[in-house]
Amino acid sequence: MPAPKGIPAPEAGAIRLDLRIGDSRTTWGWVSEDEVLVATHDGKVMLMVEPSELQWDDRTGNMKQVMHQLDGRRLVRWMRHCAEYLGQDTTQFIQDLE
């Protein structure tokens, strides 16, 4: 009997993350072609952080990451994809991010 496949690929070039032990394989999720984004089967989306893109916010004292608008939209797209596949309502948190 085949193992559950988890979430479908978030974008066309995504590569399956899996662990092979002997004849068995455990899938964990997907990694983007450029290895910047990872989506796990439990709905988490992880982003590679470049230290040069991190900045301190002088007003709040928080650290923030600066990225191009297209990269930000791509991240939100992956988050929406995972949440929708898991049956979560994406309306509110996607609107907050956009």
Image (tube, rainbow, N blue to C red):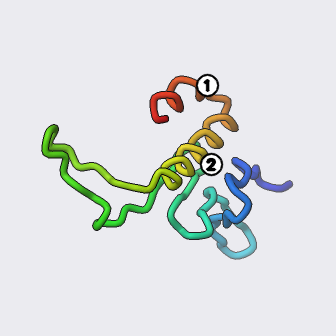
Q: Secondary structure at mark 1?
A: loop
Residue indicated by mark 2: 41
Query: Does residue 96 sit above or below 69 in this rendering?
Result: above
Give x and y (percent) for residue 41.
62, 48
In this picture, residue 83 sits left or right of residue 72: right
Q: Residue furthest toward the bottom?
A: 22
- Type of residue at label 1? Asp
- Type of residue at label 2? His
In this picture, residue 16 sits left or right of residue 46: right
Residue 85 sits in quarter: top right
Q: Nearer the viewer, residue 12 or 2?
A: 12
Give x and y (percent) for residue 36.
50, 64
In this picture, residue 48 sits left or right of residue 35: left
How packed is label 2: few (under 14 Cα within 10 Å), some, or many (20 or more)? some
Q: Which mark is residue 89?
A: 1
How packed is label 1: few (under 14 Cα within 10 Å), some, or many (20 or more)? few
Quadrant containing the N terminus in the rendered view = bottom right
Residue at (62, 28) in percent of width and height: 88
